[in-house]
Amino acid sequence: MSKSGIVLFCMAMLWMSNMYTTPVAFAQSIDEARAKVEEAPDDPPRHYNLGLAYYIAGRYAEAITAFQEAIRLKPDYKEAFYNMGLAQQNTGKVAAAIGSFGKAVEIDASYADAYAGLGSAYRKNGQHAAASKSYKTALKLKPENADWHLNLGILYQMMEDYPNAVVSYEAFLKYASDKNSKNHTQIRELIPKLKEARAK
C-alpha cells in the first residue's frame, strides 16, 4: 500500500471510530430528570443526571448548561467536567473541551477516561503529540482498553510513526473483545502493510 493509501485508510478509520469517547450510560428521561431537579434544585447529582439525559438525546448545549450547574454546586465534580467536555466536543468547542477534561484530571490524576477525552480533543485540535501523550497516560491506567490502543495507533499513523502504530494496533488486536468486527479485520490486514511501509 502506498503512503497516500495508508493515509486515506487512516482517515476512514478516524471517521468510523469517532475516537471512542462516550458518556456514562444512563436511562433516565429528560422529563424524569427535570422533575428530580425541581424536587431538589441544590442537589448536584440531579443536575448532572439531567445533563446526561440531554447528552443522550443529542441536546448538547442544554447538557453543557446542566453540567455547569452541577459544577457550580460541586466544584470538584470530575464526572460533570468529563461529560461536559464530551458535550463541548460535539458542539465544536474543542478548546473548551480540553479545559474541561484537563480540570477532570486535575481533580483526579487517575481518571483514565478523562485522559482519553483529552486525547480525543487534542487530536481534533490538531495537537497530535499532546493527543498521543494523553492516550498513553490513559493506557497506563487502563492498559486493556482496546479502543484507546486503536485511537493511539491511528494517531501514530497520522504522524507517519509506523513502528509505534503497529505496536498500538497489535495491542488493539490483543484486547479487542470482538475478534470478528470490521475494525479488527481491517487492522489485522493493515499491519503487514505498515510494516512494509516502515521497511522502505
Image (tube, helix red, strand yellow):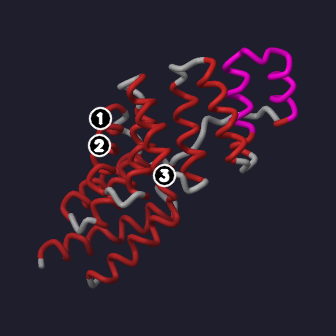
Q: Quadrant of the C terminus?
A: bottom left
Residue at 31% over, 57% down: 128
Between the C-alphas of marks 1 and 3, the distance is: 24 Å
Q: Is residue 38 above or below residue 102?
A: above
Q: Residues within 10 Å of mark 3 (few under 14, many from 20)?
A: many
Residue position marked by numbered label 1 in the rendering: 140
Q: Which residues, given as a range, are shown in magenta?
A: 31-53
Q: Secondary structure at mark 2?
A: helix
Mark 1 and mark 2 in contact? Answer it, CB < 8 Å: yes
Residue position marked by numbered label 2 in the rendering: 136
Which SS type dominates the magenta stretch? helix
Report whether 56 appears left or right of 123.
right
Residue position marked by numbered label 3 in the rendering: 94
Residue at 61% over, 23% down: 72
Q: Secondary structure at mark 3?
A: helix
Image coordinates for residue 167, horizontal then vertical, percent: 24, 55
Residue 36 is a magenta residue = yes
